[in-house]
Image (cartoon, grey):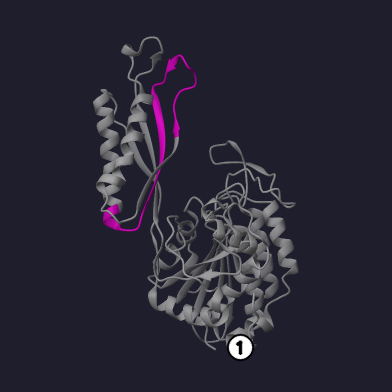
């Protein structure tokens, strides 16, 4: 990546960026030792220890393993930088020398493989390094810096848990909330866009009650598997026939489970659904459609007990503040130059925006890439970019550099955009 002249904010980044070698080592360690949502004990301890060593006022165990470090540095704005810490129940297949072989018990008590398949390890380490950079450069800015390490993003509960546990009684209320996310883009590139970035997400659990019995006597039973199959098929019509064309909505059935043996008709079936939308009215219509279809298919099958349809997780869309994005584009453009690229909204979801929505303050999340440059260019030439491993893939393996340096520079520059110079 092209080096820039050491003037203004660009010069501060180049001058005060710490040696990233120890942070690369920390990254490999965190990647090798991932922790599931709500279990981020060691990762949070690593982040908290680093902030304490820098002289931040550090608060731990907020909403679980949440950490918030505060650096008071004179009068001026308060800027909150956020990184999420949790990993996923995915078996790593990257073949990296520091790949995870770890397993853990999930909330249901099942032993599952664990992997940092979404870049949160990079988020953690880049915020640690950014804290070092901004601490070293503190004679050049004035204000208050908050570095927040959030647990349980993958089940979109961590931000809410920190807020409900009194986060903003422990730390100053920020004037702006900033975050970033690693995505499938070329390493060294950054993208920031106003308006829609990430969808709202709702996780829905459905239970269908049938009448169990012997597989040889279906006339004596009400088969929930047949009902479930009809529900899954019919749900595909919600987006195609009930959502305004051009308005984004996704309905996915990620889990269907019933029964244990071939000759036994079970008495119930469970579905797990994921809904993604941007527009509030579209969300309400999609969820209403799901409930109507589930209840109607059960009624058509003659079930006695009404099905349950429960929203178990929910998070709003991430809609970036336009004036804040304009300010970031100015500083990002001057620094990253041709590596500041355009990107489209993503049909994934985050609970990041809750940290700002709780106070009614502006927020922005931007994205940065981690795909090796040659791999990316080859895929672009062949038209196979969509075949590259993306977030949540067992093959997700961002290259360490210049990915980490880009993330550190972007997070530091983002904070300096708003801290008083």
Please state which of residues 180 and 97 is positioned toward the viewer in this rendering.
Answer: 97
The location of residue 350, given as percent across then percent down, is 46, 58
- Image location of residue 207, percent across then percent down: 37, 32
Q: Is residue 259 magenta?
A: yes
Identify which residue, 103 or 282, lies in the foreground. 282
User: Badge 1: few (under 14), some or many (20 or more) residues near its Cα, within 10 Å?
Assistant: some
In the picture, residue 322 is in which quadrant? bottom left
Q: The residue tagged with tag 1: helix, strand or loop? A: helix
Q: Position of residue 107 (x, y in %)?
A: 54, 41
Q: Is residue 176 magenta?
A: no
Residue positioned 47% across, 69% down in the render: 342
Q: Which residues are magenta?
A: 256-282
Image quarter hosting the C terminus: bottom right
Name the quadrant containing residue 129.
bottom right
Q: What residue is at 25 percent from the left and 32 percent from the top?
A: 296
The image shows residue 328, relative to residue 114, as above or below, that is below
Q: Label 1: which residue?
A: 140
**Side of 228 relative to 148 (left or right):** left
Say if residue 145 shows up in the picture: no
Which residue sits furthest top?
A: 216
Q: Is residue 218 above or below residue 201?
A: above
In the image, residue 25 sits, relative to residue 410, either above or below, namely above
Judge whether 332 appears above or below 350 on screen. below
Residue sitting at x 41%, y 21%: 266
Please tell me which residue is depicted at 61% across the width and 65% down the height of the picture. Answer: 187
In the displayed structure image, the side of residue 159 where residue 88 appears, left or right = right
In the shown orientation, is residue 111 left or right of residue 177?
A: right
């Amino acid at each position: 990546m092209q080096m820039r002249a050491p003037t203004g904010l660009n010069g501060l980044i180049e001058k005060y960026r710490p040696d990233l070698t120890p942070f690369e080592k920390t990254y490999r360690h965190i990647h090798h030792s991932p922790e599931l949502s709500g279990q981020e004990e060691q990762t949070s301890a690593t982040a908290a220890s680093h902030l304490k060593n820098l002289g931040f006022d550090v608060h731990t165990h907020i909403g679980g393993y949440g950490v918030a470090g505060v650096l008071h540095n004179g009068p001026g704005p308060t800027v909150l930088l956020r990184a999420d810490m949790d990993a996923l129940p995915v078996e790593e297949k990257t073949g990296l020398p520091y790949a995870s072989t770890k397993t853990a018990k999930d909330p249901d008590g099942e032993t599952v493989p664990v992997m940092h398949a979404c870049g949160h390890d990079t988020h953690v380490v880049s915020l640690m390094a950014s804290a070092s950079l901004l601490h070293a450069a503190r004679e050049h800015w004035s204000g208050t810096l908050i570095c927040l390490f959030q647990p349980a993003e993958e089940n979109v509960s961590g931000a809410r848990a920190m807020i409900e546990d009194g986060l903003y009684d422990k730390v100053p209320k920020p004037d702006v909330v900033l975050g970033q996310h690693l995505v499938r883009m070329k390493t060294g590139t950054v993208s920031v866009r106003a308006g829609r970035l990430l969808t709202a997400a709702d996780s829905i659990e459905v239970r269908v009650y049938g009448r169990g019995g012997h597989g040889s006597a279906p006339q004596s039973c009400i088969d929930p598997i047949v009902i479930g199959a009809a529900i899954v098929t019919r749900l595909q019509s919600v987006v195609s026939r009930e959502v305004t064309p051009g308005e984004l909505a996704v309905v996915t059935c990620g889990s269907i489970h019933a029964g244990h043996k071939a000759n036994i008709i079970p008495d119930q079936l469970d579905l797990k659904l994921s809904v993604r939308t941007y527009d509030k009215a579209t969300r309400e219509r999609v969820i209403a459609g799901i409930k109507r279809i589930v209840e109607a298919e059960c009624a058509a099958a003659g079930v006695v007990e009404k099905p349950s349809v429960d929203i178990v997780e929910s998070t709003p869309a991430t809609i970036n503040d336009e004036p804040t994005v304009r300010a970031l584009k100015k500083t990002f453009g001057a620094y990253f130059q041709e590596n500041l690229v355009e990107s489209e909204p993503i049909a994934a979801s985050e609970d990041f925006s809750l940290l700002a929505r709780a106070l009614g303050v502006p927020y922005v999340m931007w994205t940065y890439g981690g795909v090796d440059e040659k791999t990316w260019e080859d895929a672009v030439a062949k038209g196979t970019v969509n075949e590259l491993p993306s977030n949540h893939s067992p093959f997700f393996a961002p290259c360490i550099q210049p990915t980490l340096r880009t993330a550190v520079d972007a997070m530091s520059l983002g904070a300096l955009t708003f801290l008083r110079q």
